[in-house]
Image (spheres, grey):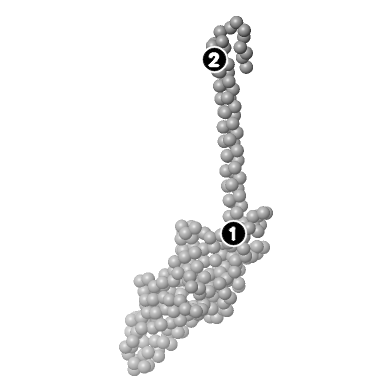
């Protein structure tokens, strides 16, 4: 730093000193900004790594030190369901029996085509396990999978095979009647404790769910036109009309 020399121009020396001070301040400020940017970048990277680790930990797909204990809880089904018979068998028999009874009551004619059919959740569970067992997938434990009727819809609980954390894929479906057939909207998907965002849910899971319901919709379509779907304790009620094509055949 410059000194004020005796006998010199004091104003000039003060100006020089001021300039040197400002240069020093600017150099230090520049270094401070660079350090600040570096710290901010490292902090952002650290937060991103923590967020990624939290997501992995929440799914239960892997054990993440320090995070799994806080982010993950072992998923449990809404309630236990006992497997009965597959949907295709249940629906075909029930509607065929109903149609035969109506025709006998009407002496060969069908005056009342309306029907109401209650399908228990054990039937959905049987079809779910059968469908999973027929595929070559190694992700889901078919024998422990189940379908449960809940106030939010039909819950599909799919435990992951060989997963040390006991994680599961859980889908909640909203069933409805559309164009005389059954439609299923994926309302919610969870992997372990992680809720999957809606757009991902629709793109990744909805097509597979609709494909899995084809045997059921085909069984219904052979006998009836579906007009309504509602839930009750441990079962789903389907209402509609017996189909004209079956009536003509009979």
The picture quadrant where one finds residue 178 is bottom left
Question: Picture coordinates of residue 86 (x, y %)?
Answer: 52, 78
In the image: residue 215, left or right of residue 71: left
Question: Which residue bears the numbered disc 2?
Answer: 15
Query: For this rendering, which residue is in front, 193 or 237?
Result: 193
Q: Secondary structure at mark 2?
A: helix
In the image: residue 221, left or right of residue 71: left
Query: For this rendering, which residue is in front, 109 or 161?
Result: 161
- The residue located at (43%, 87%) in the rendering is 97
Q: Quadrant of the N terminus?
A: top right
Among the two numbered marks 1 and 2 on one chain, the one whose residue lies closer to the N terminus: 2
Q: CA distance from mark 1 to mark 2?
A: 66 Å
Visible residue check, residue 231:
yes
In contact (CB < 8 Å): disc 1 and disc 2: no
Q: Secondary structure at mark 1?
A: helix
Please rate how many residues cluster around mark 1, counting C-alpha atoms within 10 Å: few if below 14, some from 14 to 19, many from 20: many
Query: For this rendering, which residue is in front, 20 or 124?
Result: 20
């Amino acid at each position: 730093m410059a000194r004020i020399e005796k006998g010199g121009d004091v104003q000039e020396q003060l100006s020089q000193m001021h300039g040197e001070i400002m240069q020093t301040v600017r150099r230090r400020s520049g270094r401070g900004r660079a350090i600040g940017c570096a710290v901010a970048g490292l902090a952002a990277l650290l937060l991103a790594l923590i967020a990624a680790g939290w997501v992995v930990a929440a799914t239960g797909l892997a054990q993440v030190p320090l995070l799994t204990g806080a982010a993950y809880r072992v998923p449990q089904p809404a309630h236990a369901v006992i497997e009965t018979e597959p949907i295709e068998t249940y629906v075909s028999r029930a509607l065929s029996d109903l149609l035969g009874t109506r025709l006998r009551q009407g002496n060969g004619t069908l005056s009342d085509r309306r029907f109401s059919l209650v399908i228990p959740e054990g039937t959905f569970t049987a079809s779910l396990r059968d469908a999973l067992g027929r595929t070559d997938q190694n992700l889901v434990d078919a024998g422990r999978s189940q379908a449960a009727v809940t106030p939010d819809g039909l819950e599909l609980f799919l435990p992951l095979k060989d997963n040390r954390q006991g994680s599961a894929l859980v889908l909640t479906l909203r069933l409805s009647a559309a164009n005389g057939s059954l439609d299923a909207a994926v309302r919610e998907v969870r992997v372990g404790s992680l809720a999957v965002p809606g757009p991902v849910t629709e793109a990744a899971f909805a097509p597979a769910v609709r494909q899995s319901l084809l045997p059921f919709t085909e069984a219904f379509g052979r006998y009836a036109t579906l007009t309504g779907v509602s839930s009750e304790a441990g079962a789903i009620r389907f209402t509609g009309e017996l189909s004209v094509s079956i009536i003509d055949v009979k």
